[in-house]
Image (cartoon, rainbow, N blue to C red):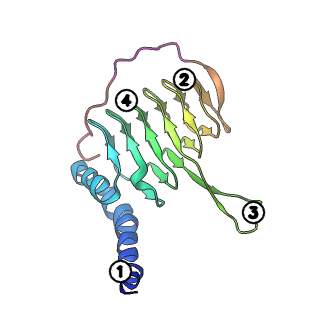
Amino acid sequence: MIRRLLNDYFAVPIVAFLRGWLLNVVVAHLPMASLRYGYYRWVCGIRMGRGSSVWLGAQFTGDKMHEIVIGDYCSIGLDSFWVVGAPIRFGHNVAVSHRVEFYTSDHDPDDPSFARRNGPITIGDWVWIGSGAKILKGVMIGEGAVIAAGAVVTDDVAPYTIVAGNPAHCIRQRRARQFTYRHETTPLFY
């Protein structure tokens, strides 16, 4: 009984504060990346690989932040938006441009109770996601794929495929299959 009261009146509001307002209003705008990354790791449980960065302005919501895994040498640009009701997993050397949105949850419009539906997002190695793209629940993006700016990805994307549009559709295959670029640091004050 006492434990339940403590959880209901203290633990839940404290976690909501730490993973809600404090995370999205204060931490998201700290100009020192090491402070943000420490908070993401220790308070939110996000796993970030070597040399990876999440730039200023990232906004998070959802109860599965601890199931975000970002591989080595990934770069996630300014003002990303994350709805995390299921796991989000990045491979290595993923380049995500500014204002990209990730949605692992939506609601069933035909359900009388407006039930929430969750599905993971998996992003392979060497993927490039253009500015303003939206990645929806249950999507797997294959190695080396390119998501054009503003694309809305509703279905899986095959490896080395370039997609664009709403909903995203194949434009062509990526010619390169071997890559040498690597993101290694967060720019100062980003």
Say left or right for 102 vs 55: right
Reading the chain from its start, which is encountered first: label 2 or label 3?
3
Magenta range? 174-181
What residue did someone put label 1 on?
10
Q: Measure the C-alpha gap from mark 2 to mark 3.
A: 34 Å
Which mark, residue 159? Answer: 2
What residue did someone put label 4 on?
93
Q: Which three-letter amino acid code belongs to the residue tagged 2?
A: Pro
2 and 4 marks in contact (CB < 8 Å):
no
Task: Residue 166: give x, y in percent of width and height.
Answer: 67, 39
Reading the chain from its start, which is encountered first: label 1 or label 2?
1
1 and 2 marks in contact (CB < 8 Å):
no
Q: Secondary structure at mark 2?
A: loop
Q: Residue at x 64, y 36 (%)?
A: 155
Q: Residue at x 54, y 17 (%)?
A: 174
What residue did someone put label 3 on?
111
Q: Nearer the viewer, mark 1 or mark 2?
A: 1
Q: Secondary structure at mark 1?
A: helix
Reading the chain from its start, which is encountered first: label 3 or label 4?
4
3 and 4 marks in contact (CB < 8 Å):
no
Quarter of the figure that contains the N terminus: bottom left
Q: Secondary structure at mark 4?
A: loop
Q: Which three-letter amino acid code belongs to the residue tagged 1?
A: Phe
Q: Which three-letter amino acid code belongs to the residue tagged 3?
A: Asp
Q: Measure the C-alpha gap from mark 1 to mark 2.
A: 47 Å
3 and 1 marks in contact (CB < 8 Å):
no
Task: Residue 144: give x, y in percent of width and height.
Answer: 48, 23
Q: Measure the C-alpha gap from mark 3 to mark 1.
A: 33 Å
